[in-house]
């Protein structure tokens, strides 16, 4: 199962990028034997200032055809890490690739949110989209670790 993270904005070198790269590497190593991965990060940027509608068009173009679309949104469902792992396993078992969409500073356009099969939230607080990337990649690795039965996730 391939995983795509489609996100608004370009991530420059720094601690967030280092964490994302580390977690994606861990996810691929742990998930490979489980049929999870590879994962790729696709970044889009609206240089014309068209706002959420323009970002939604760019994101829609970045989403591979046939993928399950999951948005990261403050209004989404709050899942435990084991529940997230089981959802990923379900998509893998049904031979579906997954794209996670992370919007820009104003969020995800309602037209794109409406196309999502699922929307998840990392809690009631609003997080900067660069930190959401870190949190998502860590949860992908954690999900692979849970499914592999490693001691990374402690209950």
Image (tube, rainbow, N blue to C red):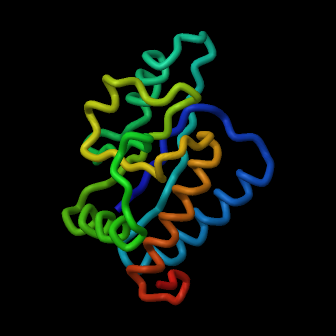
Left or right: 34, with 134 as reference point: left
> Of 141 and 92, which appears nearest the observer?
141
Q: Report the number of discs.
A: 0
Q: Position of residue 144 (x, y in %)?
A: 44, 74
> Of 78 and 62, which appears nearest the observer?
78
Q: Quadrant of residue 36?
A: bottom left
**Residue 86 vertical placement versus 15 (above, below):** below
Give the quadrant of the N terminus.
bottom left
**Residue 124 vertical placement versus 7 (above, below):** below
Q: Residue at x 57, y 36 (%)?
A: 43
Left or right: 103, with 120 as reference point: right
Q: Position of residue 33 (x, y in %)?
A: 41, 80
**Residue 22 vertical placement versus 49 (above, below):** below
Q: Position of residue 127 (x, y in %)?
A: 58, 43
Name the residue furthest right.
Answer: 14
Q: Residue at x 76, y 41 (%)?
A: 12
Q: Quadrant of residue 10?
A: top right
């Amino acid at each position: 199962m391939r995983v795509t993270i489609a996100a608004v904005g370009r991530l420059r070198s720094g601690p967030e990028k280092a964490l994302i790269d580390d977690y994606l590497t861990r996810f691929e190593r742990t998930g490979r034997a489980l049929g999870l991965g590879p994962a790729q990060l696709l970044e889009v940027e609206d240089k014309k200032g068209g706002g959420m509608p323009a970002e939604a068009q760019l994101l829609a173009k970045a989403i591979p055809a046939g993928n399950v679309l999951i948005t990261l949104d403050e209004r989404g469902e709050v899942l435990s890490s084991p529940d997230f792992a089981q959802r990923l396993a379900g998509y893998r078992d049904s031979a579906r690739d997954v794209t996670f969409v992370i919007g820009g500073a104003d969020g995800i356009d309602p037209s794109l949110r409406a196309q999502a099969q699922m929307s998840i939230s990392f809690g009631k607080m609003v997080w900067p989209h660069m930190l959401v990337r870190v949190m998502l990649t860590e949860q992908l690795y954690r999900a692979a670790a849970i499914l592999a039965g490693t001691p990374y996730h402690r209950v």
